[in-house]
Image (cartoon, rainbow, N blue to C red):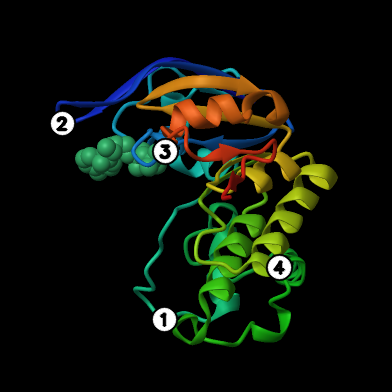
């Protein structure tokens, strides 16, 4: 359960989130939607305790600042928007890093760790690529590797910042199915930033629509992603018609 209570945040002097309040119940599958610069990534970072401000954010009723990074890593897995490959690890070594919060500093992985990693690799269809080095992966495979690492972290909360960017539609569907399975089978609470309205409508149980650091609307996908709200939030000129799936209609 995640609670954001009257949370404001500024980078230097620039307000990015303004008096934001939202409650994400256990097992929610929430799409965060909004124009560039709305503050979507900043909100996820705030929940992942990656900003220097934590007051107003609660996880399972406990203020975020009371969580050590080690404890939080067992609660929240965060997959950032862009991850450059800095060290060229193999796929399986990368996924094993998801087990770090559970291991002693120099301990070898346990049999249970190995099993969990194997399961995460299987779920993300990476078993055959497990020995491959990260630099030899396609964008989609790399994205799946980072998601597999988050799965291996076995947290009740998963935060995904634009997990579908740079993926073709088949790979987008694959990621959404994997995350959807986690949500359904393990009741994982998922918050994901997404630009594709149809993905949000098809998969999410709720949509948080944001603009300029504020919440425009938060509720069922069909009620939030109406043509009218999409038009006004994204400033789409009247000459373009928008259908009920959020698609722009060209005539
Ligand atoms: P979104 O994810 O909705 O595109 P972001 O949360 O990434 O929005 O960014 C919100 C605003 O904060 C943008 O105007 C962006 O330029 C600014 N911003 C993001 N990260 C930083 C940073 N590290 N330092 C300064 N400004 C930032």
Whole-angstrom CA distance, mark 4 to mark 3, is 29 Å
Residue at mark 3: C-beta within 8 A of ligand 1: yes
Element marked by disc 4: loop
Element marked by disc 3: loop
Horizontally, is 179 left or right of 71 in the view? right
Of callouts 4 and 3, the N-terminal one = 3
> Dot 2, how many residues are within 10 Å of its Cα: few (below 14), some (14-19), or many (20+)?
few
Residue indicated by mark 3: 35
Residue at mark 1: C-beta within 8 A of ligand 1: no
Of callouts 2 and 1, the N-terminal one = 2
Location of ligand 1 given as a quarter of the image: top left
Q: Is residue 167 above or below residue 236?
A: below
Whole-angstrom CA distance, mark 3 to mark 2, is 21 Å
Residue at mark 2: C-beta within 8 A of ligand 1: yes
Residue indicated by mark 1: 88
- Residue 12's tag is 2
Q: Are marks 2 and 1 in contact (CB under 8 Å)?
A: no
Q: Mark 3 or mark 1, which is nearer to you?
A: 3
Q: Residue at x 44, y 36 (%)?
A: 236
Of callouts 2 and 4, the N-terminal one = 2
Q: Residue at x 66, y 68 (%)?
A: 171
């Amino acid at each position: 359960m995640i609670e954001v209570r009257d949370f404001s945040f500024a980078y230097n002097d620039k307000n990015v989130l303004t008096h934001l309040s939202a409650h994400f119940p256990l097992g929610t599958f929430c799409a965060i939607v909004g124009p560039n610069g709305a503050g979507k990534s900043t909100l996820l970072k705030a929940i992942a305790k990656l900003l220097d401000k934590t007051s107003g954010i609660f996880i399972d009723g406990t203020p975020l600042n009371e969580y050590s990074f080690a404890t939080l890593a067992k609660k929240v897995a965060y997959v950032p928007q862009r991850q450059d490959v800095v060290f060229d690890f193999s796929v399986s070594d990368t996924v094993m890093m998801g087990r770090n919060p559970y291991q002693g500093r120099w301990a070898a992985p346990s049999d249970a760790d190995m099993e969990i990693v194997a399961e995460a690799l299987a779920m993300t269809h990476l078993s055959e690529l497990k020995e491959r080095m990260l630099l030899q992966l396609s964008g989609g495979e790399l994205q799946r590797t980072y998601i597999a690492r988050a799965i291996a972290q076995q947290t009740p909360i998963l935060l995904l910042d634009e997990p579908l960017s740079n993926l073709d539609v088949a790979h987008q569907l694959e990621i959404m199915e994997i995350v959807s399975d986690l949500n359904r089978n393990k009741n994982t609470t998922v918050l994901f930033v997404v630009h594709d309205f149809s993905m949000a409508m098809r998969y999410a149980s709720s949509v948080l629509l944001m603009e300029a650091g504020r919440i425009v609307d938060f509720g069922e996908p069909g009620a939030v992603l109406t043509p009218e709200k999409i038009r006004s939030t994204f400033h789409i000129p009247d000459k373009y018609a928008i259908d009920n799936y959020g698609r722009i209609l060209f005539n």
